[in-house]
Image: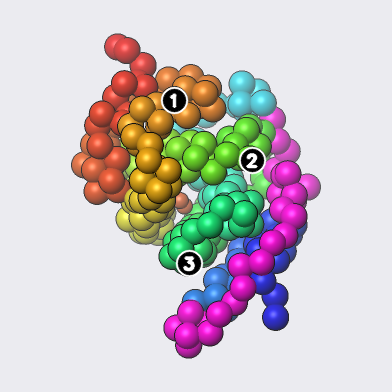
Amino acid sequence: MKTLAEMAVEVLTTADGREKTALSHRHAATWFAARAAGEEIPIGQAAPPLRPARPEKPALLDPREVPRRRPGSPQGRIAILHAVAHIELNAVDLHWDMVARFTHVPFPIGFYDDWVKSADEESKHFNLICDCLESLGSHYGALPAHAGMWRAAEDTVDDIYGRLAVVPMVLEARGLDVTPNMIEVFRKAQLQNVIDALEVIYAEEVGHVAYGSKWFNFLCGRDGLDPKPKFHELVRHYFHGALKPPFNEEKRAEAGLPPDFYWPLADQL
Ligand SMILES: [Fe+2]
Ligand SMILES: [Fe+2]
């Protein structure tokens, strides 16, 4: 029987997006079927790659070189969806990396349930957005994408505190801030299939942020640390730049992120 860490590495080392996400769904189903049957799949230990495998396309460019397009135009809408697909593909790997990277840190099994479920959901998100791109005559890989997406993972490769603070509690929380405006763009264009896909993503991302904050608080509690100053210290250390308001205070609260965690790190207006 494969260990969960081995399954994670298999996903991380699969390059093609549709193949990666199909494997991700299969491994998540295996994990949850075993959990429901009361069987135990060992977590094990594996050697996740420093960077996940990526398809030949899209070309990865420095964010400053990625061309900007007007959001109101058909090409602009395709560019937005392409960027979202790229984020979702990275998110699949980020969650499997969370599973495989920190097996030396003792956690209750619920830690693995949460990240396997998140990875499974990100796999669905990637496919939903790819379907939207294809319905508009494009596809993932048709445009260049940001090269810097894996940086937060590399920076926090040996720091579980930093990983939880920066990935779910900063980057994924940012998704909650920007998604409502994105949905508006597609409402104006009357693209109901895209609206439906983005609504699924918006609802499920709250859970990923909540898992981050739950396990960050768990670790702080176990180690006798005050979570708020620890969070500030980690974000200042690992995250490059200030957090950008406006914040989605309601969804952040739902995900267990109180305002005094993020406001002190915000751009002062
Ligand atoms: Fe997602
Ligand atoms: Fe997510």
Q: Helix, strand, or loop for circle 1?
A: helix
Compare residues 259 and 64 and report the one nearer the observer. 259
In the rendered image, which quarter is residue 29 located in?
bottom right
How many numbered markers are drawn?
A: 3
Percent x, y of residue 62: 67, 26
Magenta: main secondary structure: loop
Residue 86 among magenta residues? no
Q: Is residue 152 visible?
A: yes
Tell me if residue 244 comes above or below residue 160 in the rendering: above
Say which residue label 3 marks: 109
The residue beneath circle 1 is: 233
Q: Position of residue 202 (x, y in %)?
A: 35, 51
Q: Residue, x 62% and y 54% (percent of image)?
A: 104
| Quadrant in which the C terminus is drawn | top left
The numbered mark, 1 or 2, whose residue comes first in the sequence reads 2
Q: Amino acid at mark 3?
A: Ile
Q: Is 167 displayed left or right of 210 in the figure?
A: right
Mark linked to residue 157 = 2
Q: Nearer the viewer, residue 263 or 91?
A: 263
Question: In the image, residue 28 lies at what x, y percent?
Answer: 55, 71
Q: Earlier in the sequence, mark 2 or mark 3?
A: 3
